[in-house]
Amino acid sequence: MQLSQTLYRYRYQYLMLVPGLILAGMFVFYPIFAAVYYAMHDWSGFNADMVFVGLGNFATLFSDPIFWDAFGRSLLFLVGTVPAQLVLSLILAVILNNQLLKLSTTFRTMIFLPVVTPVAVIGIIWTFLLSPFNGPINGLLLNIGLITRPIDFLGSSDTVMPSVIGVYVWKWLGITLIYWLAALQTVPSDVYDAAKLDNCKGGRLIWHVILPIILPFAVAILLISSVAALNVFPLIMSMTNGGPFFGSEVMEIFIYRTAFATEDGSIPRLGYAAAAGVFFGVIMLALTILQSLATRRARRSTQEAGHE
């Protein structure tokens, strides 16, 4: 009876939630259940011949070396981008957080500009910059004598992933910088004054003073950046399309190519791609849960240290 009274009392508030629930059902919940449903069927996606195979797609997926190669490249991309992104942005945040630094706002804006630039534009511009045919970067390296012939950064399996990793770090450095700056605002000014008296600066200041205070934020930033690093479909598609010779094909490109692309003449396999998508989604969900648990634990550890 109490529940019905509460529902009636706040009926207008609950009514306001209906549009949001409808949109969430259409664009969040339905695609999730549909992906699981299609993952259990052998279906090309272009005809009515849908055969139920249960977990057969997953069994095939886990024995597919091409899938594991794409999964390994996703992990390589994660390992290559997140540490560099976090360390560089933290150093810049500590520098730009100094209130005495002139034009700090201007520098923050300049670093953040790539974040708001469309990914497709970034990909096209960097494809031109890295081109071995009159590309500015190759021209600069040739002029200063570091190389004797142009490097095909995006056309070689040896250099394509480092090149895309570098562009990704440059593109998203600004958003991580904002995260760190927000975290640094929680550090009391007295802490900086005490560190200055103890002649604690540079790496010692960051490692021994700042990081222990902002540990909950650091954990959250680490895991947010890790999740973001697994979603690189637009950048890689605009720069390499997964090439050369699948050298930059990460999980998202593998899923797209399996479901829709037919450049190699193969038949689209939407059910098989859905199985890969479900597996990839489970990995993302695990990282999200890990982020929540790790952030909560770090916050509790910081609070306990503060009470001591």
Image: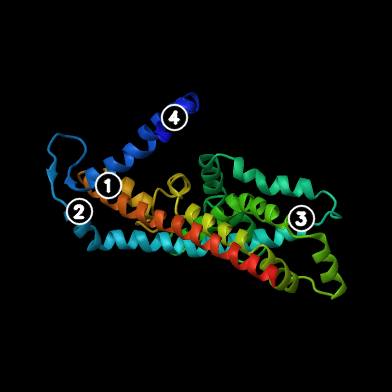
Report crowding for label 1: few under 14, some 14 to 19, many 20 or more residues within 10 A (C-alpha): many
Is residue 300 placed above or below 272 in the rendered structure? below
Q: Say whether disc 1 or disc 2 marks the residue closer to the N-terminus.
A: 2
Q: Nearer the viewer, residue 221 or 49?
A: 221
Reading the image, the residue beneath label 2 is 57
Is residue 53 placed above or below 27 in the rendered structure? below
Q: Say whether disc 2 or disc 3 marks the residue closer to the N-terminus.
A: 2
- Residue at 80 percent across and 74 percent down: it is 200
Reading the image, the residue beneath label 4 is 5
**Label 3 with label 4: CB-CB less than 8 Å:** no
Q: Nearer the viewer, residue 280 or 256?
A: 280
Q: Label 3, label 1: how many angstroms apart (C-alpha)?
A: 44 Å
For badge 1, the amino acid type reads Ala
Q: For the N terminus, give its image quadrant.
A: top left
Name the mark nearer the viewer: 4 or 2. 4
- Residue at 49 percent across and 23 percent down: it is 12
Name the mark nearer the viewer: 3 or 4. 4
Q: Which mark is residue 274?
A: 1
